[in-house]
Structures are given as structure tokens and as C-alpha cells.
Image: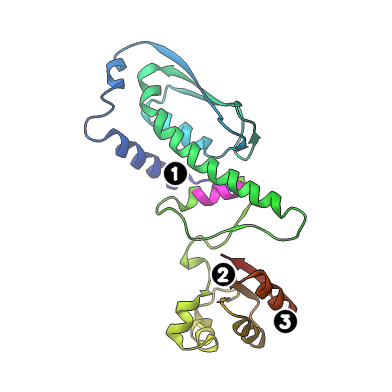
Amino acid sequence: MNIPNHILSPLIEKALNEDFGSFGDLTSISFQDSDKELTASISSNQDGVISGLLCAKMVFNKIDNTLNFMPQVKDADFVKSGTEIAKIQGNAYSILAGERTALNFLGHLSGISSETYKLVQMISDTKALILSTRKTTPGLRVLEKYAVKCGGGQNHRFGLDYGILIKDNHIKAAGSISKAVELTHNNKPYLSEIEVEVDTVEQFKECQELGIKYILLDNMTPEQIKECIKYNKNNSVLEASG
């Protein structure tokens, strides 16, 4: 999974505008007319999985396209504390002005990747997958879902237009699971399936009777999940969130 430039570029520009404000970097601006060249280094301060190098590179290059950003590792690499992640060579002002925004992207995305990696390792002896949801930071969904992939996870829906997922509020609005399935059936994208979120074992059994292929077990206890698995006569694909 790559981050398309037409999505990444506006996000970087917005982040830089947020940091520079109306008057720019009032501290580093003293170095702006200087010919002083620096070689800066970014290092990890703990073990984890790297994500966001492309973001960091774009931050520096949007400030100064003469800066040379040199990754020493790749996104999705696991690194130990103290590992050099990247070097940046060029004008002192440009490096100083961009360092915080670049590190914000790197730190945020690497944090997501690292936490995802921990969860993936916890279930590595099973056939289960770790999936990301739509509960993302507004405006940063593509980046955060990219970070999940770097950590070894997979992505669920990117947005509401990626498929039909009938949740508890949809069921309440329709009056029942069967009615919600009936109402949404005609909007089901070609070659895709309807997924239903259930809160109880009784709702799960109803989905089995309706032949629902994908069922999301929402905030269920391990005991409830085991019971649903026992009643999964249709071999539905089960997801658990909570």
C-alpha cells in the first residue's frame, strides 16, 4: 500500500501552514540567509516499527527542495532504540524549520505501526487478523491505515462507500436486522457482501438464519464469542471489536 501524492501533499502543506502561521519560524528565521550547511540525524528512542518516512521527506522538500533526505531504514522495518532512521543534509534554516512537523508525522505513524505490531505478534500463532477501523484522526485516515499495514495489520473499510456494514443504530432505525438487510440489499456493491454488527448471541443466530456471510461481534465477552462460534453453522466470517 502506497500513499498517493495527491492525498499526501495537501496534508503536508496543511501541517506546515499550521506550524508556520502568519509569520513563519521566528526562531530559525535568524539562520535563513545563512549559507551554513548541516547534517542532521533522526534516531529512534525506543524499539518499534517505522512508518512515515515519505511524510518526513516531503515536509523537508516542501520547505526546501535542495535538502537531501536520506532514509537509513524503510517503512515497516522493526528497529531497536538508538537506530539511525534518517539523515538530512542542507541549509540550517530549512532543516530547523521542518524538523518538528517531520517528527510529528514520523512519531505518530510509527507509534501506530509499533502498537499494531505488538497485537499482530500476540496472535501470530492463530489464523486471526488485526484490522483497522474508521475510528481514525479526522483527515489522517489514509496515513493511519498505512501505518497499520506497516505494523503487519490489515485494513477494514476506508470509508462509508467501501461496503455495507449494518450497525446497531441502523438496526434500531430499521426496526430489525432482517428489515435492515432488506433495505440495504439494493445498495450492495457488485461482488460484495453485507456485513452485520451484532451485540448478542440471539442476534448472531438471527444473522445465521438470514445467511449473512460477514458478522461483527461488537463488545462481546470471550464467552459470548465462543458461543457464537459454536452456532456458526454457515461458516460466516467473524470479526470481533471492542
Q: Mark 3 = which residue?
A: 231
Q: Earlier in the sequence, mark 3 or mark 2?
A: 2
- SS category of the residue bearing label 2: loop
Residues at marks 1 and 2, CA–CA distance in whole angstroms: 34 Å
- Residue 191 is at least partly visible in this image: no
Inspect the image, locate mark 1, and give the three-letter code of the amino acid beneath it: Leu
* Label annotation for residue 170: none
Say which element carries label 1: helix
Q: Which residue is mark 2?
A: 219
Which image quadrant is residue 193 in?
A: bottom right
Q: Position of residue 154 (x, y in %)?
A: 62, 55
Residue at (60% x, 49% y) in the render: 116
Q: Residue furthest top?
A: 35
Give percent across and percent down for residue 96.
Answer: 38, 23
Real-space CA distance between mark 3 and mark 1, rounded to the nearest whole angstrom: 45 Å
Q: Which residues are magenta?
A: 144-150
Quarter placement of the C terminus = bottom right
